[in-house]
Image (spheres, rainbow, N blue to C red):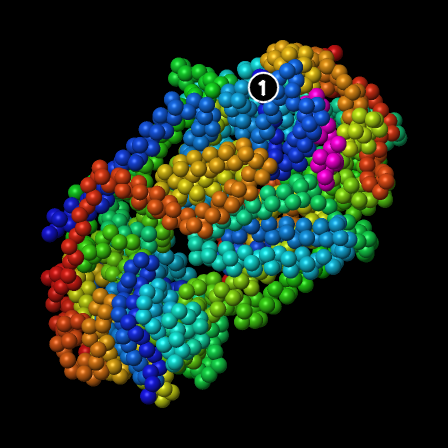
């Protein structure tokens, strides 16, 4: 019972790690970046390649899995994405799906279509017994990182002026500029940061979810579910939604395996029909 | 004394359309200017061009010695322009207070001071931007421009939607700011009578060009010009008589 | 010089792309080794990507038949992709060589279908028998919830209970990133062994989570058909895969001169890849086509399919033949265990069940 | 005279804020009634309640004697209750011609008609022309609404409400953004409506209010503060203190 | 003066309803391919079906502003309905088409109530969820649908008892093209009708639409149901012409592809779906024949370029070109003299 709860939390956290970058770009910047998964994949491949081909230790690859996609995000933002903020969501969908296709084929071309596997360091493998509950070490590791991320993100967005300037820039970029907000700088920073988060998520998620060129397409739905159910105006919303979905999914599959596949989708539909703006939309 | 703002032969518009053309304009520090004209004559476009959110075609814009012709809008704001857009454009997902703090720059006008000017805003400080009444939005738009502590205020129909008593206070405050603190202002207004009492000079736009420029006093005393360009007649008969 | 065209329809993109890649690479390797003329005719291979979608497979097959006038079609990475064009094969009398799809019924869909891969019951029933003989009493099966998975579940459950074993069934959705709730159920059930079938790509995740949950240490043996320890990715799984026991028709570590040559040539032509059971299906499929064409002098149609029936040869996987009745492949099934050989992980074969026919059709025939 | 529109004990709360505080209000048939009050007093909220854009916390609304409290907004329109919005609500991608045409054809029941081409009915065309001319929109009929100057958009906003042929018309600051010279004409058009159409006007321009209205209600902090004739209200010192200030004179 | 304006008003409104030369040409060329491109009929058939599917999405997305990532639900239901009927002996194609339309319309009607509220993102995800759940149901109900193996044993009777489906796909293409054309005519009529105008107004501003008395929800439910029926017909066409149905008909990529197709061709413009289907399918066919492994890269690149080059401008240009051609038949309304402000 408690083990299931723990697994659910860990799975939820994993969803969150992967989706929080999207919560930033889609949720806060209102940019439908379906290529989010491609940045996550980039992070995953950075970790896999560094570990498998160069023998870099797992932990040491994580910062690079953040920085690499962040720089990639920054470059793409400055050259391409920035032209699309003012465009319709449909344009954004088309564009970012195009990027995904390119990324999928490019990764396939350079690394092949097979799974990339990584070996965790031994101190992250296995599980320990805490008060009678079997706790997986790697899953605990993910929970800790996630917790830290949520707190940090929440502080940045609510306690600094950056957060309100970002939201102002999203609400009305034209007027925000006219009132002295450097919209492009804010967008570029945020986008790079979101991409970095995606990369980190990809690196952390690769162990459990696997990593192959179709990664961005395979998990796109999950990212979107988390962000939509959580609501798009905060970080805590998607965080709580991840937890809820993770626990519901794991518990559903454990207790009623025959309908396990329906749980997450049905939950999503029900939540969205009852609360169209998302479960945890800030009601201030 | 040198100009605070100089526009030389400025033309601008949206997309392929040129809306204002060949605008020349000089404004000294502490001077205020009323911009009048019928609907669609380019008043808003003129202000938008000064802040830089239209498509610039030709001419130059200089503020306080700084050439802003091709500068980005945020640079212009930093250079000392505060803008009240016609449609208010309150940031809807920010609270009243965040709307102010997000753009505030150091100077005599801080959040508290604008709250003193519009006590209604203090009461509603934690309302989201999209949960304000029309007049409250207008007050917030003016307050938001003030906390930028600009040298030049661009006000696009700032009195629209405000209660008479607030308009009275706002105009009085504007006069104080301009006279007392040396801020300059360009005010677009529909009510010629109301604004001409406040500003130093006035111009009238028609089809994107300046068709009249003079001191405010001179325009008030020139009912023929008002009638010709704005269609303002001296006194109207009550509407009630119009029915039946 | 006439040309004989072979239409090779495979999932080259999408989640099953690696199936397509293995088969294409093997087919090309075969042509490179054996030359591209057979019976004086030039062989032309036309590769099409069906993206893993059945109606596209069908359309591509139809176009190949109508426009390119192919003599034989081949490939078919998944069960529905093999079933969709089956009526076409019958209608146009074009033989179809199934190189991957593994649901038992496929060859019954058209008299023009012949298979060089395997059937899941074929690989599974020996597993059940081995388990029963090796002191395993209670098994939980865990399969992906789609055609082949259900095939495997049925075959295993039937054979194992027939031997007096006890079975509990679990199915996981095909698109399922996290196995933890299912593995927890397995842990609760405390079986002697866990029988697992998941499509090869997710095998690695499964293995890792199996070990992470400590199931290996609590004495649950991992058994199943060979998909979960697919040669393509086996080496990357690391130590977690060690000790898994599987039954299948092919291992890259199969000890025979034919296989050594095959593996070496394959790796040389495709660095970073190790041939797996898909590759050998493609390789043998080409061999079957070549042999058939030799017999018919380049003739397609009914003659070709007839010529293919009963063909036997020594494949990299061992001796194989095409059952003239069912057009399905008869082959040895090996029991293997994952071990480290020269620093790399391999499925090392330690027992052989010779000449296994597809049990489903064999049962029907009796 | 009979009552066109009535509210009984209408209340609307936004969280802790009482935006409409127990308002019982009557609009008489054919009235030219104005509703004034400080910014944020709850005037727009009141209109939103009347038209069903938001739901009241408590209280009832009657249109020509029939209760409409829970009725959907579009049904209220069909029963003759039309409004304009304080902040323009238009169809940015449509032309004024289409916008007016839409309102007219909806009123005439054409909206369910999916087989006839729009504009093939004489009566609709004539009415579009009439409204376009009345609101001086003929020169921009084929422009995209989003490209119109603010003032033209304002006129279109009112024209659309007109096209609904309302029995009760609610105008929320219709003259905002309209040049001084044209405001009177605009309201003259409104005033020239048949006498059986009742009008409730919200406006901060006292020139207009005083020349248009025959009755004025004052709303302060969500509650009705006072009501009376133009003379009564404009000379009421309490109204001057909270709303009018010194400079307004009759 | 006012009769002058009245003429202008009428011609402005009615113009949209007229068929231009460009449109007539489009369909003539489409019909001509029946004779001139015999070896391409299979892919043309697929294009016609996807075109119809995209047209159906356009009805809700382009005209009513309902975004959907789950349109495959209706397509798939239609496909399974037609497929199951044919498998169980009701082999008449038109019967299957009708049944598919009805089944999909019912599902559309029921689920339409889920998409009346919420932001675009919410709608995307709810529709997606509906399609995924339906896909899962189809997977589990393998006794009815054949599950993951696909629905087998479909044999179609001749159309109207006259035309047998042939292996060259000619009958299939002619059939799909005819059905698509007929449904196109209906859709075209709808979008220029007052009903269509009211849909566009809802898309632009539902608040205001209510304020002019439009029963917003009812209109949306109606168009969603109609679009569902269209999608169901498209699915049925696929099932009947390929005589096979598998779970892919309900898959996410099916919904996503049709969205891409529509957006490429242009939203809110009935030819958008058709043109998008042609462009997308032809590109995919050509590029994937050339590089079966990496064609996605080039498609991706093309999508990116289309967007950067200004998709809206591109389709706008196509549209004006269209109008330009059309304009020569339909007399364009003369420009009006500007009314002076004093005139009223
Ligand atoms: N975004 C836009 N795109 C294209 N044209 C525009 C745009 N905004 C305004 N215009 C056009 O520019 C001209 C001038 O508009 P502008 O808004 O500057 O007028 P204005 O004098 O401020 O009028 P008002 O008194 O109504 O506010 C108008 O003819 C209008 O149609
Ligand atoms: N959705 C909402 N949530 C919370 N408060 C709201 C909301 N909508 C309006 N309010 C508040 O209710 C009060 C009444 O607003 P309303 O728009 O009715 O005022 P008004 O009388 O029309 O003012 P104005 O003359 O400025 O237009 C305001 O203080 C406003 O901030
Ligand atoms: C075992 C696998 C080769 C089975 C294959 N995925 C099929 O659908 O038949
Ligand atoms: Mg303006
Ligand atoms: Mg108001």
Q: Is residue B36 above or below residue A268?
A: below
Answer yes or no: is residue E120 visible: no
- Closer to the camera, A75 or C331? A75
User: What x and y, as percent, mark residue D80?
Assistant: 25, 53
Q: Is residue C237 above or below residue C79?
A: below
Task: Provide the major secondary structure of the magenta segment.
Answer: helix
- Closer to the camera, D110 or C266? C266
Q: Residues within 10 Å of mark 1 (few under 14, many from 20)?
A: some
User: What x and y, as percent, mark residue D20?
Assistant: 38, 67
The stretch in magenta equals: C265-287
Q: Which residue is mark 1?
A: C3
**Which residue is pictured at 25% across the width and 64% down the height?**
B40
Disc 1, ligand 3: is the CB inside 8 Å?
no
User: What x and y, as percent, mark residue B244?
Assistant: 10, 62
Residue E192 position by quadrant: top left
E196 lies left or right of C70: left
D22 lies left or right of E242: left
| Secondary structure of the residue carrying numbered label 1 | strand
**Which residue is pictured at 47% across the width and 42% down the height?**
E260
Answer yes or no: is residue E339 visible: yes
Q: Quadrant of the C terminus of chain C?
A: top right
User: What x and y, as percent, mark residue C250?
Assistant: 77, 28
């Amino acid at each position: 019972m408690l083990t299931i709860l723990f697994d659910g939390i860990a799975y939820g956290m994993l969803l969150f790690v992967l989706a929080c970058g999207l919560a930033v770009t889609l949720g806060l910047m209102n940019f439908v970046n379906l290529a989010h998964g491609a940045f996550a994949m980039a992070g995953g491949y950075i970790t896999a390649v560094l570990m498998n081909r160069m023998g870099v230790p797992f932990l040491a690859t994580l910062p690079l899995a953040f920085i690499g996609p962040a720089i990639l995000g920054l470059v793409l933002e400055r050259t391409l994405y920035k032209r699309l903020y003012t465009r319709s969501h449909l344009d954004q969908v088309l564009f970012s799906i195009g990027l995904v296709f390119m990324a999928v084929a490019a990764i396939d071309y350079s690394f092949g279509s097979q799974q990339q596997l990584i070996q965790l360091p031994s101190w992250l493998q296995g599980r320990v017994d805490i008060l009678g509950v079997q706790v997986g070490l790697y899953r605990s590791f993910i929970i800790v990182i996630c917790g830290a991320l949520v707190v940090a993100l929440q502080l940045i967005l609510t306690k600094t002026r950056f957060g309100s300037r970002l939201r102002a820039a999203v609400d009305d970029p034209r007027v925000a500029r006219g009132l002295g907000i450097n919209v492009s700088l804010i967008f570029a920073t945020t986008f790079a940061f979101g991409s970095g988060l995606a990369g980190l998520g990809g690196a952390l998620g690769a162990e459990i979810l696997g990593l192959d060129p179709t990664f961005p397409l395979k998990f796109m739905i999950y990212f979107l579910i988390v962000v939509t159910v959580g609501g798009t105006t905060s970080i805590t919303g998607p965080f709580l939604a991840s937890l809820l979905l993770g626990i519901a999914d794991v518990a559903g599959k454990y207790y009623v395996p025959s309908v396990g596949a329906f749980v997450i989708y049905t939950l999503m539909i029900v939540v969205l029909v009852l609360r169209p703006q998302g479960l945890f939309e800030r009601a201030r | 004394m040198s100009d605070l703002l100089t526009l030389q032969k400025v033309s601008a518009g949206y997309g392929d359309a040129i809306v204002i053309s060949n605008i020349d304009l000089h404004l000294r520090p502490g001077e205020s200017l009323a911009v009048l004209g019928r609907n669609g004559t380019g008043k808003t476009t003129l202000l938008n061009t000064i802040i830089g959110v239209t498509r610039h075609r030709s001419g130059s814009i200089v503020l306080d010695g700084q050439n802003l012709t091709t500068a980005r809008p945020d640079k212009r704001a930093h250079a000392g322009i505060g803008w009240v857009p016609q449609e208010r454009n309150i940031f809807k997902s920010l609270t009243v207070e965040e709307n102010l703090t997000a753009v505030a720059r150091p100077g005599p006008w801080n959040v508290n001071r604008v709250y003193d000017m519009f006590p209604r805003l203090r009461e509603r400080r934690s309302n989201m931007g999209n949960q304000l009444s029309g007049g409250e939005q207008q007050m917030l738009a003016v307050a938001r421009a003030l906390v930028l502590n600009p040298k030049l205020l661009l006000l696009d129909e700032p009195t629209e939607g405000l209660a008479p008593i607030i308009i009275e206070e706002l105009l009085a405050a504007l006069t104080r700011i301009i006279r007392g603190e040396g801020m300059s202002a360009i005010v677009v207004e529909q009510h010629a009578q109301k604004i001409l009492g406040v500003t130093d000079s006035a111009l009238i736009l028609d089809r994107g060009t300046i068709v009249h420029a003079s001191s405010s006093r001179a325009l008030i005393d020139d009912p023929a010009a008002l009638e010709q360009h704005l269609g303002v007649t001296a006194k109207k008969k009550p509407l009630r008589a119009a029915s039946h | 010089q006439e040309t004989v065209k072979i239409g090779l329809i495979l999932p080259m993109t999408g989640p099953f792309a690696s199936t397509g890649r293995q088969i294409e690479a093997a087919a090309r390797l075969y042509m490179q080794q054996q030359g591209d003329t057979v019976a004086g005719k030039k062989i032309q291979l036309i590769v099409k990507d069906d993206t893993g979608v059945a109606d596209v497979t069908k359309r591509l097959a139809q176009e190949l038949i109508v426009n390119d006038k192919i003599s034989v079609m081949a490939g078919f990475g998944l069960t529905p992709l093999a079933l969709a064009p089956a009526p076409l094969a019958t209608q146009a009398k074009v033989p179809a060589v199934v190189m991957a799809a593994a649901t038992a019924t496929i060859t019954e869909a058209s008299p023009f279908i012949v298979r060089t891969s395997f059937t899941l019951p074929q690989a599974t029933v020996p597993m059940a028998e081995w388990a029963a003989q090796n002191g395993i009493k209670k098994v939980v099966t865990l399969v992906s919830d789609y055609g082949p998975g259900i095939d495997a579940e049925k075959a295993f459950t039937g054979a194992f209970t027939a031997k007096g074993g006890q079975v509990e069934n679990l199915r996981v959705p095909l698109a399922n990133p996290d196995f933890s709730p299912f593995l927890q159920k397995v842990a609760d059930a405390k079986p002697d062994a866990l029988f697992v079938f998941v499509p090869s790509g997710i095998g690695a995740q499964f293995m890792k989570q199996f070990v992470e949950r400590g199931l290996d240490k609590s004495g649950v043996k991992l058994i199943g058909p060979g998909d979960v320890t697919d040669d393509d990715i086996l080496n990357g799984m690391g130590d977690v895969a060690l000790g898994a026991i599987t039954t299948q028709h092919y291992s890259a570590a199969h000890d025979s001169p034919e296989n050594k040559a095959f593996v070496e040539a394959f790796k040389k032509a495709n660095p970073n890849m190790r041939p797996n059971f898909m590759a050998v299906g493609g390789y043998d499929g080409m061999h079957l086509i070549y042999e058939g064409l030799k017999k018919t002098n380049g003739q397609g149609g009914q003659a070709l399919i007839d010529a293919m029936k009963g063909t036997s040869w020594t494949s990299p996987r061992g001796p194989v033949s095409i059952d003239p009745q069912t057009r399905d492949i008869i082959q040895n099934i090996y029991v293997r265990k994952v071990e480290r050989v020269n620093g790399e992980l391999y499925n090392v074969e330690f027992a052989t069940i010779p000449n296994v026919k597809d049990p489903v059709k064999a049962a029907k025939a009796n | 005279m009979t009552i066109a529109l009535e509210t009984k004990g209408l209340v609307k709360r936004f969280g802790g804020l009482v935006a409409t505080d127990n308002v019982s209000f009557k609009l008489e048939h054919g009235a030219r009634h104005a509703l004034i009050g400080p910014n944020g007093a709850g005037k727009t909220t009141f209109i939103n309640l009347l038209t069903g854009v938001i739901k009241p916390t408590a209280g009832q609304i009657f249109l020509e004697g029939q209760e409409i409290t829970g009725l959907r907004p579009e049904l209220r329109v069909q029963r003759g209750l039309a409004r304009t919005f304080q902040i323009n609500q238009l169809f940015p991608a449509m032309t004024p011609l289409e916008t007016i045409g839409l309102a007219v054809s909806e009123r005439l029941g054409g909206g369910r008609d999916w087989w006839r081409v729009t504009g093939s009915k004489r009566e609709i065309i004539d009415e579009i022309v009439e409204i376009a001319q009345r609101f001086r929109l003929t020169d921009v009929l084929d422009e995209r609404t989003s490209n119109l100057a603010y003032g033209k958009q304002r006129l279109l906003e009112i024209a659309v409400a007109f096209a609904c042929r309302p029995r009760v018309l609610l105008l929320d600051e219709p003259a905002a953004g309209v040049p001084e010279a044209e405001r009177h004409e605009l309201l003259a058009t409104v005033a020239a409506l048949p006498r059986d159409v009742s009008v409730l006007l919200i406006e901060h321009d006292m020139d207009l209010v005083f020349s248009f209205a025959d009755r004025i209600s004052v709303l302060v902090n969500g509650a009705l503060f006072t009501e009376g004739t133009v003379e009564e209200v404009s000379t009421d010192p309490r109204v001057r203190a909270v709303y009018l200030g010194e400079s307004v004179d009759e | 003066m006012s009769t002058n304006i009245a003429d202008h008003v009428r011609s402005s409104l009615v113009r949209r309803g007229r068929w231009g030369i460009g449109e007539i040409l489009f369909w003539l060329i489409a019909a001509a391919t029946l004779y001139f491109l015999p070896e391409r009929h299979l892919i043309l058939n697929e294009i016609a079906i996807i075109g119809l599917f995209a047209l159906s999405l356009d009805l809700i997305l382009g005209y009513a502003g309902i975004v959907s990532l789950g349109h495959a639900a209706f397509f798939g239901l239609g496909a399974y309905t037609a497929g199951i009927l044919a498998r169980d002996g009701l082999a008449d194609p038109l019967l299957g088409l009708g049944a598919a339309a009805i089944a999909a319309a019912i599902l559309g009607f029921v689920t339409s109530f889920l998409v009346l509220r919420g932001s675009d993102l919410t709608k995307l995800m709810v529709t997606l969820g509906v399609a995924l759940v339906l896909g899962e149901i189809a997977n589990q109900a393998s006794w009815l649908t054949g599950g993951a193996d696909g629905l087998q044993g479909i044999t179609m009777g001749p159309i109207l008892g006259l035309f047998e489906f042939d292996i060259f796909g000619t009958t299939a293409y002619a059939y799909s093209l005819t059905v698509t054309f007929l449904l196109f005519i209906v859709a075209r009529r709808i979008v220029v009708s007052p009903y269509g105008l009211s849909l566009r107004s809802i898309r632009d501003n539902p608040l205001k639409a209510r304020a002019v008395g439009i029963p917003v929800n009812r209109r949306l439910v109606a168009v969603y149901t109609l679009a569902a029926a269209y999608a169901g017909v498209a699915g049925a066409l696929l099932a009947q012409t390929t005589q096979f149905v598998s779970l892919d008909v309900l898959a996410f990529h099916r919904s996503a592809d049709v969205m891409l197709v529509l957006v490429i061709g242009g939203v809110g413009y009935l030819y958008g779906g058709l043109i998008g289907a042609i462009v997308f399918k032809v590109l995919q066919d050509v590029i994937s024949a050339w590089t079966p492994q990496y064609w996605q890269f080039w498609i991706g690149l093309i999508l990116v370029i289309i967007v950067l080059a200004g998709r809206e401008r591109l389709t706008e240009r196509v549209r004006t070109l269209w109008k330009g051609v059309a304009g020569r038949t339909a007399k364009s309304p003369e420009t009006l003299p500007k009314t002076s402000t004093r005139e009223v």
